């Protein structure tokens, strides 16, 4: 197309495009930006109506924004891939018609909402590999057709603004991914560091309370018990925060990195050993370095709760932790030779593990007696997602 732009019109188009570019790349509301696009385009083209139509994967185009002196609201109208707007969005070539209701290229596809319009022009909304759809302008049937200079300005404006919006959309996707990754990092720090330290502090306080029970005044013992309960509650609240940080997951975000469950198990066993006064035996089998994060979180919580019960209630002199990955999934066993879980002891944590296993499509069972000690078993498949 030859350069026919009238200087004043070209300057107005450049000014409008710059204004929209600034709004789009500064994170402006997408709907407001599109509204500005159709408003500016209608003014530049001297049109009675301007539409932004966005192309779907199947080639159809749908009206996403509209501006003009029309009575019906065409937003949401869908045109087939064979329509002029569909071809513009697919082929990247501007289409112009003096009267779209009689032109054979456009007449079969004019929806009822647009039948009172005649002169029509549609330009690719974007350029190259970044065409989002079509920018179309209309005049009433009594209006004059769009001249070549106006069409050229419209085409240039649509190309520039469409590319900018495509880039802004991609930048927003990258921002969402970065944000999700940062949320995942914070969640991991909370889960792996803060919760672990609170858990260790709680068990240490509990040991002090049990060892010094006879030396504490009743009020001091009660206060210490309340402090331990508050730590447990804090741990639960942090775990809830972790779940909130990790959900919902943006569709474009990468999945959380797989977890080295063997390293996590060693850390949990090391803390328990410090509190027990002897190192539990740890047996690892199978590939544990690429366990999905959600699965690893379940296993780690089960191991932590089982070891917590050993420290707090068992009086055991031996503890064995077995962690195995095989074709069926991951299997955790924590066995001790202690006095079992007392009947009058609150087993809320163990009940939570049972519920956790059920939600995740796994299995949990507990076998405990004063003569045989306690066995906690927690199994998860790797081909199902946790809820």
Image: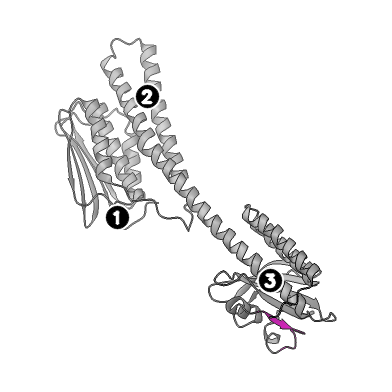
Q: Which residue is mark 2?
A: 228
Asked if the magenta segment contains residue 97, the reply would be yes
Viewer-proximal residue among 199 and 67: 67
In the rendered structure, the answer to whether residue 98 lies left or right of residue 223 reads right
* Between discs 3 and 1, the one toward the N terminus: 3
* Between discs 3 and 2, the one toward the N terminus: 3
| Front of the two marks 3 and 1 | 3
Viewer-proximal residue among 287 and 87: 87
In the rendered structure, the answer to whether residue 222 lies left or right of residue 131 reads left
Report the disc number at residue 236.
none
Report the disc number at residue 156.
3
Residue 225 quadrant: top left
The CA distance from mark 2 to mark 1 is 35 Å
Magenta-drawn segment: 94-103
Task: Determine contact: label 3, label 1, CB under 8 Å.
Answer: no
Viewer-proximal residue among 43 and 9: 9
In the rendered structure, the answer to whether residue 180 lies left or right of residue 224 reads right
């Amino acid at each position: 197309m030859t350069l026919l732009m009238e200087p004043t019109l070209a300057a107005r188009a450049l000014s409008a495009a710059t204004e929209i570019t600034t709004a789009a790349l500064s994170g402006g509301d997408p709907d407001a930006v599109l509204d500005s696009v159709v408003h500016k385009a209608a003014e530049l083209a001297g049109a009675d109506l301007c539409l932004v139509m966005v192309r779907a994967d199947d080639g159809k185009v749908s009206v996403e924004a509209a501006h003009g002196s029309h009575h019906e609201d065409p937003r949401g109208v869908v045109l087939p891939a064979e329509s002029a707007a569909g071809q513009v969005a697919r082929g990247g070539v501007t289409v112009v018609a003096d009267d779209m209701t009689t032109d054979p290229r456009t007449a079969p596809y004019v929806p009822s909402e647009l039948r009172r319009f005649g002169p029509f022009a549609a330009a690719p909304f974007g350029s190259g590999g970044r065409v989002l759809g079509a920018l179309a302008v209309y005049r009433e049937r009594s209006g004059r057709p769009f001249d070549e200079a106006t069409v050229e300005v419209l085409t240039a404006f649509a190309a520039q603004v469409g590319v900018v919006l495509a880039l802004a959309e991609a930048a927003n996707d990258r921002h969402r991914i970065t944000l999700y990754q940062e949320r995942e990092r914070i969640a991991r720090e909370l889960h792996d560091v803060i919760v672990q330290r609170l858990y260790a502090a709680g068990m240490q306080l509990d040991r002090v309370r049990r060892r010094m029970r006879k030396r504490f005044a009743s009020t001091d013992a009660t206060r210490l018990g309340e402090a331990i309960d508050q730590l447990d509650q804090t741990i639960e609240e942090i775990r809830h925060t972790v779940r909130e940080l990790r959900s919902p997951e943006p569709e474009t975000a990468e999945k959380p990195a797989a977890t080295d469950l063997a390293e996590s198990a060693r850390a949990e066993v090391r803390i328990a050993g410090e509190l027990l006064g002897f190192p539990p035996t740890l047996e690892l089998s199978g590939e544990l370095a690429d366990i999905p994060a959600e699965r690893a979180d379940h296993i780690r919580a089960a191991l932590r709760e089982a070891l917590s019960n050993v420290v707090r209630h068992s009086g055991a002199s031996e503890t064995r932790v077995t962690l195995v990955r095989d074709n069926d999934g991951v299997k955790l066993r924590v066995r001790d030779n202690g006095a079992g879980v007392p009947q009058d002891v609150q087993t809320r944590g163990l009940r939570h593990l049972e519920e956790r296993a059920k939600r995740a499509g796994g299995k949990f069972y507990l076998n405990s007696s004063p003569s045989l000690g306690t066995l906690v078993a927690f199994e998860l498949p790797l081909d199902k997602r946790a809820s």
